[in-house]
Image (cartoon, coloured by chain):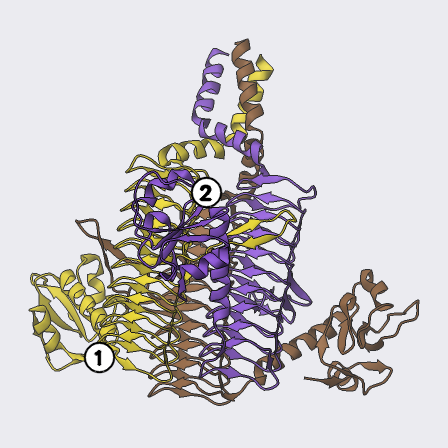
Chain colours: A brown, B yellow, C purple
Amino acid sequence: MEFTLGQLAALLGGTVEGDLSQKVNRLDKIQEGKTGGISFLSNEKYEPFLYETQATAVIVSEGFVPNRTFSTTLIRVKDAYLGFTTLLEAYAQFSKNALSGVEEPSFLGTGSTMGDQGYRGAFSYIGKNCIIGNHVKIHPHAYIGDRVRIGDHTIIHSGAKICADTVVGSNCEIHPGAVIGADGFGFAPQPDGTYKGIPQIGNVILEDFVSIGANTTIDCATMGSTIIKKGAKIDNQVQIAHNVIIGENTVIAAQAGISGSTEIGANCVIAGKAGIVGHIKIADKTTIGANTGISKSIKNSGQTLFGYMAMDMKEFLKSYTHFKNLDQLAQRIKELEKKG
Amino acid sequence: MEFTLGQLAALLGGTVEGDLSQKVNRLDKIQEGKTGGISFLSNEKYEPFLYETQATAVIVSEGFVPNRTFSTTLIRVKDAYLGFTTLLEAYAQFSKNALSGVEEPSFLGTGSTMGDQGYRGAFSYIGKNCIIGNHVKIHPHAYIGDRVRIGDHTIIHSGAKICADTVVGSNCEIHPGAVIGADGFGFAPQPDGTYKGIPQIGNVILEDFVSIGANTTIDCATMGSTIIKKGAKIDNQVQIAHNVIIGENTVIAAQAGISGSTEIGANCVIAGKAGIVGHIKIADKTTIGANTGISKSIKNSGQTLFGYMAMDMKEFLKSYTHFKNLDQLAQRIKELEKKG
Amino acid sequence: MEFTLGQLAALLGGTVEGDLSQKVNRLDKIQEGKTGGISFLSNEKYEPFLYETQATAVIVSEGFVPNRTFSTTLIRVKDAYLGFTTLLEAYAQFSKNALSGVEEPSFLGTGSTMGDQGYRGAFSYIGKNCIIGNHVKIHPHAYIGDRVRIGDHTIIHSGAKICADTVVGSNCEIHPGAVIGADGFGFAPQPDGTYKGIPQIGNVILEDFVSIGANTTIDCATMGSTIIKKGAKIDNQVQIAHNVIIGENTVIAAQAGISGSTEIGANCVIAGKAGIVGHIKIADKTTIGANTGISKSIKNSGQTLFGYMAMDMKEFLKSYTHFKNLDQLAQRIKELEKKG
């Protein structure tokens, strides 16, 4: 993907102050710019880098007036930051759509269909009776079990595993190594101390615009469905157990874990390493801090919770301040006892 | 897999109150029943759903008397719950055994043998000199290293990695993305601040009836074996370090971690995100709460432990109640000091 | 790999007290020695096992005088422990280098080159325009994206995923299922409550002698690079977010997590399950205890930190001792109040 500065200026509605035929193929930070890269200057703090950068071009805002000499070429646009963002998105969009066709060997089970403009990488596996939409990109080593449905414009990255009967919406992105729809962890204790597996015959439903991080695991329901609702974004190494429901636009950071049958509301923010027990409900717009443990339902929306056993965040921090000084507190009690 | 109601009634020793030739191909929750599904009604709380369900059939107990009209077909058995469980297990068993034969391309190393009734999915890899039992199902993208042995009726799911020299018992199930037998984390600090890898030449032994969750990692021993004993059930994203021993019928929930050379007893229950340091022993029948940290051996069996640094669970909860009120406690000390 | 005792004695500069033509193919613990294995006796605590071991041979130090009969064959060397270590390293080195050539089917994209003495396992995938050094071993199911560079003597294990544009140094080892260079977790909240993905166009750089554990995830930078510096050793299931920098010779144990843009110094030791927030700096030679939460920059090097919200380790343990007795402390306050 190589573009001339002239092409980029046209895309951004800007003007090139120099040679329009120079080519760039990469977006660089201004402080790390090298030949072939294009950067931007928005925050004046970074202005000194403009005079030193080796980037081929730098996007600047209309009003910018340089006060020293420089060797890069300026592209002037209305707002440098917005211009660069536009470029960034165009670049990302282009990268995603660049792949198409089928690399061999790949495996497509009987009865499975794939829409137009798709990509199936080498060693990708699609089971039987799957229905896969248009513009779907299935990367190398991805595994799609039997009867899976996948909506348009969804990307399944390398080595992601979408188990049988999973339903994936449109515009989803499943990152490498994620496992969607493996058996839930259900075992019934027997009188002799052994455990007997409880069949897990449900599935997982990912609605539209869902993102699932690398090596995250989402188990299928015992019966019915584990559901990740529209627009939810889930980071790497998150564990979501059977029959969990995650609300719309809820964000879950890395290494968090949600136990079975718990229902998380919409627009929640769950920080990294948080743990939530099973069979509870979390109200909409709840914010849960890093490494926080939640053992009870949260009924009122809009709260911010934190702590080993979750409390209101401010209250926890107050208690923790005293915890840090517990030795002094204990000394003071001793003093009082002496006096008494 | 499609069955007539007549076939199912015969399997369950029950009677169909309606058309025996109707077909079902799915088990549904009664409140989510749709055409082609079969549900059950056991808990009377769910009776209202019977009158509305669109499931093709519902299993009910002998004595059940409906008090309204309904459109589904009843199958009457002695005990609806047991009947459904029977169906569930038959279904699960059938699903597991349905796969057989070899999909191509797949890779079988020289000197490796595979028993009868097995399945090798496309892109599965089996190294050299492996001995694999009967009825073993090796799903697509599974990796089996050199000299691995696998017992009868074991299932290796998609993308699971069983490294060289691992021994897997019979009736085990290894879920997608699990890594069994990668190198333990052993590095010797050198005088110049660098680290030198200590060769990890041991293996992992999984005994019979062991279940390993998706993306769980179990490292090989430095020398000798990391051992997961008979009937142990391990959830997703659990980390088990080199030379650990997990006792019979011990259950470990998601995201727990066990450090090197620790020995866990039999019939323990370890909840999600618990962390256990290395080189200690945990007595049989120990229960360890979620996110609990264990830094010392547990010598007496039957205890329930909880907390950031584990305590008896009741004691921890008592202390935590005071922690929540530490600000008030500190105020009370201040008051006493004023008086004094 | 089978060797005669004569060959091994030659390697170790020792002498065989028995039949030089006996063969061994395995290193055993002395207490678990079986025919075909070679063990060592260094610590006198283990001497009793010498008289019972079924190992074919045992390495002993020059001065060792047995006081009972035994059936194994002794190999006498200057120092038994060093001798065994030499053997261990030779064995590990040999194992690593044993693989070479190409197993089919495998995929090598256009414009990609691979050096001498390499190995590409069946179902391994290498994208376009990759530059791969000499003696590089790429195991089955490994995924290498476009434009990746890999230095000499590096090992990419089964199912590891090295995403596009990643740079991997020489003498690195990437364990099974690790994901290097997946998208960072960056989403911008929109006025309507939805999130819009922020393109992640940077890469990951692993310098020389870096080790990455099984199922660990290291995200690519938003722009620029996520960097793991020379000699850093990272265990299983560690999460490293976008734009993080890990210093030279820093060691990170399993299930730890580092949030975005944080910079960890050199020669740090980070224990299992520790969590570090984003956008901070950790000084060189910092030790961070298991399950510790770090929310602020650590400016002075050489500290040891521990706790739910990190404190000096000794201070935390002091406070935690009082926490355990908070109920008694509260009782004592009550008593004082009664008296007052």
Where is mark 1, residue-wise?
B1
Q: Position of residue C312 (x, y in %)?
A: 60, 36
Q: Is residue A21 left or right of residue B191?
A: right
Q: How many marks?
A: 2
Q: Quadrant of residue C43?
A: top left
Q: Position of residue A212 (x, y in %)?
A: 49, 67
Residue A287 is labelled as none
Label 2 element class: loop
Q: Are marks 1 and 2 on the same chain?
A: no
Q: Position of residue B293 (x, y in %)?
A: 44, 42
Badge 2 density bin: few <14, some 14–19, many ≥20, Cα 10 Å: many
Residue at point 52% right, 9% down? A340
Where is mark 2, residue-wise?
A309
As drawn, A197 above or below C82: below
Amino acid type at image mark 1? Met
Residues at marks 1 and 2 touching, judged by CB atoms closer than 8 Å: no
Amino acid type at image mark 2? Met
As drawn, B229 above or below B315: below
Between A327 and C7, the one lying in front of the other is C7
Q: Position of residue A19 (x, y in %)?
A: 85, 85
Q: Chain of mark 1?
A: B
Residue C279 in view, yes or no = yes
Quarter of the figure that contains the N terminus of chain A? bottom right
Badge 1 density bin: few <14, some 14–19, many ≥20, Cα 10 Å: few
Between C9 and B65, the one lying in front of the other is C9
Label 1 element class: loop
Q: Chain of mark 2?
A: A
Distance Cα–Cα, label 1 vs label 2: 46 Å
Query: Mark 1 or mark 2: which is in front?
Result: 1
As drawn, A187 above or below B300: below
Residue at point 46% right, 76% down? C121
